[in-house]
Image (cartoon, rainbow, N blue to C red):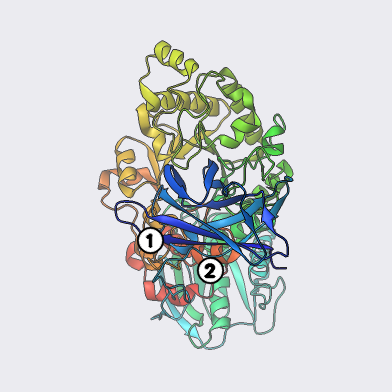
């Protein structure tokens, strides 16, 4: 059904500023429109200092904007209202940096939807999105991704009908086959199965062999005319070996003119890094349990072993905490009449979503069966607007309500280190998380705390005098050292973003930091004695646009990142040899602001997620962009 109102937006570059927006609201209804206000959300925010012509900015909260028309304005059916705004926080670089949702609030309080389009710019091409992946070519006809450590194979022209456990296989071996078979059927539900549990005519048996000389998570495959021998020393290696033979058969069936199944030869394989991760932000956009499970299936297919689950942020708190039901009753809901106002992608109807503790147990169990570790994140002390609105006792009532703002535009969004209830609250949250997540780590964020946070809080001023602390960074370090102690008491280790090191940081032992701002930050952290995961935004943030083209979706603050750049990127960079042991691995990050549709998700995440997976598993000298491009076309998406 067509909406009764439509909002169009264009951007005009201007010398000496970030340019101006022009908005036009069309009345497509059969009645006159008056006595209303217009709300839209946009990644490109209007600055505090701005000039609006034909409208007045009533309210802005981060990406939420509410404009009022001139007093007495009426828009007759078929007519429009236009206004412009000069004074933006940054210049948009892509068409998706314009309107991401819109609605009208009428005089009687009703909220009605408004349709909208891409941000227009004179001379910009909004044609078909370009193909960013070459056709690719292979020199060895085998579909394996990530590519193995070593391979010496002779192809068979006719792939086996199916693979099955050899006679005498143990119960755990048979269960492992059933597990990978189920994974394959979820990812490729219309394909013929690669495995059966009983002998198949024209099939080939897999004989399992335990070999203590093989490293953890590693495997070897030996192909003969009569059987396939899968050797490993642990369940993880056996799982990856089975995934590899499933991949080989998948390619030989899908593209028999390009790929073959091996007749003879050997594969010896092991991961390059222990930490091969993918992060998902579910605060900006909520993903149902089934979508989270499918993403974990995709991680397992690509031999990624860490699912970093970003469960809280300014926009929402998504994890059920029984001690504080307000966190999800209030903090997981956004809408025109809710405590949390609409944000990117939210329209006239309220949106809510969170994971019950039973949901979490289901997802953790699903991941565990695929040898994927779930690392939960609650982002503190910054990025805490949802928690602060849900639990007002976390706020220093003497502090000015707009004493500081985060880079995303949220006022006073950090938990206060001087309020005793802050630690009582977090202690109960950690207690419940400890029972839900078996991972050694709880990720506590620690990023993007505004430089002047807490400095207007009388309670923090007293704390700073008492503890002899200078400035926000030292206050944060004080707070995070207490948090690390609280985690240690609960048998957990602290993971965080690279800013955890600011202001003196925390005890290095048992701490893992993720270098996101740039690769050089990881080198600095390793030099300071921290264990590090490299996840630089310039290559591994999958919300970044993939080209400079105006019509390409995605964020722009980290530059554009085509798949070939992500694939070729070497996260260790100029890391000195003596610090290499500090790098635990690498990780892709999926931040949710730009993922307002499944189409955008798949356009931005794939094939860059498998590209990060190959960088995490395969030695640099074994990588081949053209081979990767040929294989990844057959790989699953969300």
Q: In the visual, does 571 lie left or right of 366?
A: left
Quadrant where the C terminus is found in the figure: bottom right
The image's mark for residue 244 is 2
Label 1: which secondary element: loop
Q: Is residue 272 in view?
A: no
Badge 1: residue crowd in 10 Å (few <14, some 14–19, many ≥20): many
| Quadrant assignment, res 247 | bottom right
Indicate whether 562 appears above or below 481: below
| Quadrant assignment, res 538 | bottom left
Residue 144 in picture, x, y percent from top left: 48, 71
Q: How many marks?
A: 2
Q: In the visual, does 535 lie left or right of 308?
A: left
Badge 2: residue crowd in 10 Å (few <14, some 14–19, many ≥20): many
The image's mark for residue 560 is 1
Work out which residue is located at the far top of the displayed protein and give it. 466
The residue located at (30%, 40%) in the rendering is 524
Camera-nearest residue between 571 and 577: 571
The image's mark for residue 449 is none
Q: In terms of sequence position, does the residue under pointer 2 or pointer 1 come before the other?
A: 2
Q: In the visual, does 431 lie left or right of 600?
A: right
Residue 34 in picture, x, y percent from top left: 67, 52
Residue 584 in picture, x, y percent from top left: 41, 46
Quadrant where the N terminus is found in the figure: bottom right
Indicate whether 571 appears above or below 57: below
Label 2: which secondary element: helix
Residue 597 in picture, x, y percent from top left: 59, 62
């Amino acid at each position: 059904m067509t909406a009764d109102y439509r909002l169009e937006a264009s951007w005009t570059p201007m010398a000496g500023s970030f340019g101006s927006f022009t908005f036009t609201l069309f009345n497509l209804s059969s009645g006159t429109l008056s006595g209303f206000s217009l709300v839209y959300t946009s990644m490109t925010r209007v600055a505090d200092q701005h000039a609006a012509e034909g409208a007045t900015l009533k309210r802005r909260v981060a990406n939420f904007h509410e404009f009022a028309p001139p007093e007495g304005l009426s828009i007759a059916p078929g007519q429009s209202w236009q206004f412009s705004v000069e004074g933006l926080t940054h210049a948009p670089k892509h068409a998706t940096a314009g309107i991401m949702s819109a609605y009208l609030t009428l005089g009687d309080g009703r909220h009605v939807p408004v349709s909208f389009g891409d941000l227009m710019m004179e001379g910009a091409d909004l044609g078909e999105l370009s193909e960013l992946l070459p056709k690719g070519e292979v020199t060895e006809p085998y579909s394996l991704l990530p590519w193995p450590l070593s391979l010496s194979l002779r192809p068979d022209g006719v792939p086996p009908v199916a693979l099955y456990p050899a006679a005498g296989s143990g119960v755990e071996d048979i269960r492992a086959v059933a597990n990978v078979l189920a994974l394959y059927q979820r990812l490729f539900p219309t394909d013929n199965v690669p495995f059966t549990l009983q002998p198949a005519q024209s099939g080939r048996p897999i004989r399992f062999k335990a070999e203590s000389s093989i490293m953890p998570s590693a495997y070897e495959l030996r192909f003969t005319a009569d059987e396939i021998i899968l050797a490993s020393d642990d369940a993880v290696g056996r799982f990856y070996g089975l995934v590899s033979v499933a991949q080989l058969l998948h390619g030989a069936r899908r593209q028999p003119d390009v790929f073959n199944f091996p007749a003879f030869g050997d594969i010896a394989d092991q991961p390059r890094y222990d930490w091969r991760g993918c992060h998902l932000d579910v605060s900006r956009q909520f993903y149902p349990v089934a979508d989270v499970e499918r993403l974990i299936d995709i991680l397992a297919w690509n031999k990624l072993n860490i699912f970093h689950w970003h469960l809280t942020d300014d926009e929402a708190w998504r994890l059920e905490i029984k001690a504080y039901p307000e966190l999800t009753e209030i903090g997981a809901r956004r809408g025109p009449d809710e405590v949390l106002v609409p944000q990117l992608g939210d329209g006239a109807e309220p949106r809510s979503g969170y994971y019950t503790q039973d949901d979490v147990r289901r997802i953790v169990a699903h991941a565990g069966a695929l040898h994927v570790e779930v690392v939960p994140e609650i982002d503190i002390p910054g990025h805490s607007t949802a928690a602060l609105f849900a639990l007002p006792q976390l706020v220093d009532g003497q502090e000015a309500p707009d004493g500081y703002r985060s880079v995303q535009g949220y006022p006073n969004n950090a938990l206060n280190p001087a309020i005793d209830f802050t630690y009582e609250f977090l202690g109960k949250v950690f207690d419940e998380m400890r029972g839900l997540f078996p991972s050694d780590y709880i990720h506590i964020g620690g990023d993007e705390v505004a430089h002047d946070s807490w400095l207007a809080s009388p309670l923090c001023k007293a704390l700073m005098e008492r503890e002899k602390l200078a400035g926000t960074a030292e206050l944060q370090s004080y707070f995070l050292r207490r948090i690390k102690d609280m985690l240690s008491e609960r048998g957990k280790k602290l993971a965080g973003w690279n800013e955890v090191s600011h202001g003196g940081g925390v005890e290095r032992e048992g701490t893992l930091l993720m270098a996101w701002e740039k690769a050089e930050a990881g080198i600095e952290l390793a030099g300071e004695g921290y264990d590090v995961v490299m996840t630089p935004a310039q290559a591994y943030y999958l919300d970044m646009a993939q080209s400079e083209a105006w019509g390409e979706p995605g964020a722009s603050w980290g530059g554009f990142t085509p798949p070939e750049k992500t694939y070729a990127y070497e996260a260790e960079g100029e890391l000195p040899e003596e610090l290499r042991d500090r790098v635990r691995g690498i990780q892709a990050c999926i931040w949710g602001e730009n993922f307002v549709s499944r189409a955008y998700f798949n356009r931005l995440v794939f094939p860059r997620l498998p590209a990060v997976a190959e960088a995490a598993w395969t030695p640099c000298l074994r990588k081949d962009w053209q081979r990767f491009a040929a294989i990844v076309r057959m790989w699953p998406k969300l």
